[in-house]
Structure formats: structure tokens, C-alpha cells
Amino acid sequence: QVQLAESGGGLVQPGGSLRLACVVSGQILSSYLVAWFRQAPGKEREFVAGVTWRNYRRIYADSAKGRFIIYRDAAENTVSLQMNSLQPEDTADYYCAAAPEYRNTYYQSKEYTYWGQGTQVTVSS
């Protein structure tokens, strides 16, 4: 079993930054992929960024490239998402998720076994 706990959400003005954190606990294996997804009201959950636990391979959705950075701290069992240049369209609930392994379908939520409760991010002036 793996438990995920997110923190760091809040209200930020357009152009601002936020850093989300996901504490990973339980029996996490080196093969795991840990990712961030988001879901805006009335929309489907979408992949944002992910990182492999073993070799620190980082992957990003097009909407995140150049603005978001995902970090993995194995010593602290934490996966963070640094979000810069935030825009109103980034407003969503952000979820941390863990999949048993990396697959080419990493962007599909069905690949992920474990999910956190989510943290809300609102970008508004």
C-alpha cells in the first residue's frame, strides 16, 4: 500500500508561482512513477507532470512545459511540483498519483493505482 498526501495549494494571482508537495509513504518500489494530475470544474482529469522513482526521468504535458518543474526527493519521499507563470486556466484541483511502473500511456489516469486527496489551486486577480 502507498499513501499520498498533497499540500501547497492556494490562491495566487496570474503570473505568480506555487509549489505543491506530495509526501509518499508506504511500500514504494523503485519502479514507481509518481505524477501530478489536475481536474478543473466540468473537465476531465488531465496529466500534468510525472517522475520515475528509480532514474528520475521527468515527463511533462505540453501545457506544463517551460512553466512547471517536477522534483523527486527520495530521501524525504516527496514529489514536488513548482508551478511558475500561473494563469487562470491552471485553476484546478491537483492530485498526486502513483503507478507501479512507467508505461507509454502514463498520461492516462487509469494507469495509476494510488491517489491523494487533492489540493486546490486558484489563479485569479
Image (cartoon, rainbow, N blue to C red):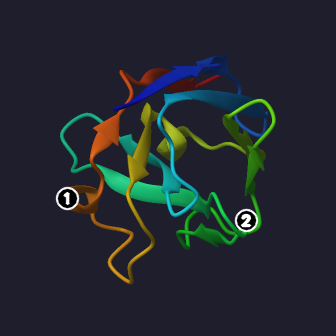
Q: Provide the secondary structure element on which disc 2 rests.
A: loop
Q: Amino acid at mark 2?
A: Tyr
Residue 124 lies left or right of residue 42; in this view the side is right
The residue under label 1 is 110
How many C-alpha atoms fall within 10 Å of the one at disc 1: few (<14), some, or many (≥20)?
Answer: few
Q: In the rendering, at what x and y percent does residue 122 appear?
A: 53, 24
Q: Amino acid at mark 1?
A: Lys
In the rendered image, the residue lying farthest to the bottom is: 104
The residue under label 2 is 56
Q: In the rendering, at what x and y percent does residue 108 appear?
A: 28, 66
Residue 115 lies left or right of residue 31; in this view the side is left
Q: Are marks 2 and 1 in contact (CB under 8 Å)?
A: no
Q: In the rendering, at what x and y percent does residue 82 appear?
A: 76, 42
Position of 92 relative to 72 (above/below): above
**Which part of the image, by quadrant, shows the C terminus?**
top right
**Which part of the image, by quadrant, shows the N terminus?**
top left
Label 2, label 1: how many angstroms apart (C-alpha)? Answer: 22 Å
Residue drawn 79% across and 33% down? 16
Mark positioned earlier in the residue sequence (2 or 1): 2
Q: In the rendering, at what x and y percent does residue 76 appear?
A: 77, 29
